[in-house]
Amino acid sequence: MKIVIVGSGGREHAMGWAFYREGYDVYYVPGNPGTARHGTNIAEIPDEEDILVIPGSETYIAGGIADGKDNVFAPDSRGARLESSKIWAKEFMKKHGIPTAPFIVVNTPKELKTALKSFSPPYVIKADGLAGGKGVIIEDDFEKAVEKGTMLIEGAFLKGVKGPVVVEEYLPGIELSAMAVASGEHFALFPFTRDYKRAYDGGKGPNTGGMGAVGPINVDKGIVDQIEDIYRLTLDGLKSEGISYKGFLYIGLMIKDDKVYVLEYNVRMGDPETEVIVMMNPSGFVSSVLSAYRGESIQPIVPKCFAVDVVIASEGYPLSPRKGQVIEREPTGFAFYAGVKEESGKLVVSGGRVFHCMGTGMTPEEARTSAYRCAESVSFPGAFFRRDIGELIER
Ligand code: AMP
Ligand code: GLY
């Protein structure tokens, strides 16, 4: 069986690398110069029977890449509404008794103002559709919340995003992300990881897709039990609506007074979390995906080591990353490739997150040291990375 990974980032490189390492014939559509070293980059998904297609990002999944196809490891576009429509997801949670913040759906600026009055600050307003991680407004001031929310409804806040929004209660607490593979009846949680969302050391600067990650993170049994209940309720709820959910399921959680609430669903893996999950047990990752794909029960995925991912970003990331610089020195050690392309025989920067420098070890410190040794070896104009990945300071 051929494995076809759709996408071109570090997450896709990491998934493909795990299959490649297990001896599979791996293809990437379109991939990048790093993935070409662990398989073959191709332009289109081959029209063949014996292939397993694994899409990386929600865009493909919400766009229907798995619709009517048994050989795509992802939910169909109906299942993808967990991520592609916040309104659908919130109503789904309410209907199936899944703990989440109380909310009101509003269609007009007038309804927005009325709804905001029934909550206290900070106010939380969420765009309904996919917004590339930018669709959440958290605002202390009532008037500003009305103003920004109105702009969001009218399409003036985010390019290409307009229409109804969700207003919900602000939940203070500790955030945690859970990721799992699922197949209708069965699911298995991946080891927990922590990602570092802000651009600069100490949790400063703008929010990014993630500047690094570390795992495994220890989570109390009482919390894990609640998370498993949430996965069970979610899969059963989907099934009762005629949706057999196959693929990855990432749940963004808030823990408040030892109780777990769902903030959001993602129908894909996280990036840079995937890189860390894969490194902690590559063969466990592969067998869990294959078991889920075949609808078999899935063995728990046990971490074999600690892993750290230090992202090497290009200056200006996340707002407007500089692109086109020639990469003078590629990472030595172990790295997954992301925003990199080849031009006239040279590697050049083509995205905000450029490399994921990986380290593993039997202690978190060992994993950090090896990831940072790799990070220090990279050189291109405007390269930067956080120095505190793996230190437990954020959250
Ligand atoms: P989401 O895309 O729904 O996960 O929201 C993005 C971020 O906004 C989350 O990671 C939280 O930090 C924050 N957030 C979202 N909803 C809430 C909420 N109800 N209470 C507090 N923080 C929230
Ligand atoms: N690292 C967060 C995400 O992939 O959504």
Image (spheres, helix red, strand yellow):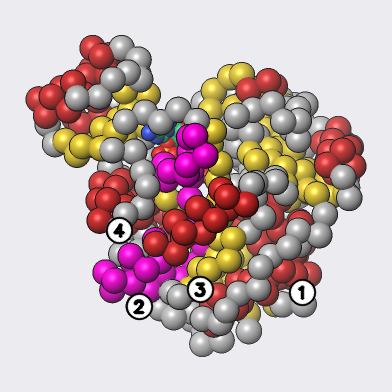
Residue 157, by quadrant, is top left
Q: Indicate the position of residue 70 as horizontal and vertical percent values.
A: 44, 80
The residue wearing badge 4 is: 96
Q: What element carries label 1?
A: loop
Residue in view at x 33 percent, y 66 percent: 238
The residue wearing badge 2 is: 68
The residue wearing badge 1 is: 22
Question: Reading the chain from its start, which is encountered first: label 1 or label 2?
Answer: 1
Q: What element carries label 3?
A: strand
Residue ranking furthest to the bottom: 49
Examine the rendering and report whether any part of residue 355 can be seen.
no
The one nearer the camera, 325 or 334, is: 334
The residue wearing badge 3 is: 186
Q: Distance between the residues labelled 1 and 3?
A: 23 Å
Instruction: Specify the segment rendered in magenta.
Output: 234-263
Q: Which of marks 3 and 2 is in front?
A: 3
Q: How far apart are marks 3 and 2 (CA)?
A: 21 Å
Query: Vertically, is 291 above or below 106?
Result: below
Whether label 4 touches label 2, CB < 8 Å: no
- Crowd rating for badge 4 (residues with CA inside 10 Å; few <14, some 14–19, many 20+): some
Q: Distance between the residues labelled 1 and 2?
A: 29 Å
Please state which amino acid type lies under the numbered disc 3. His
Please state which amino acid type lies under the numbered disc 4. His
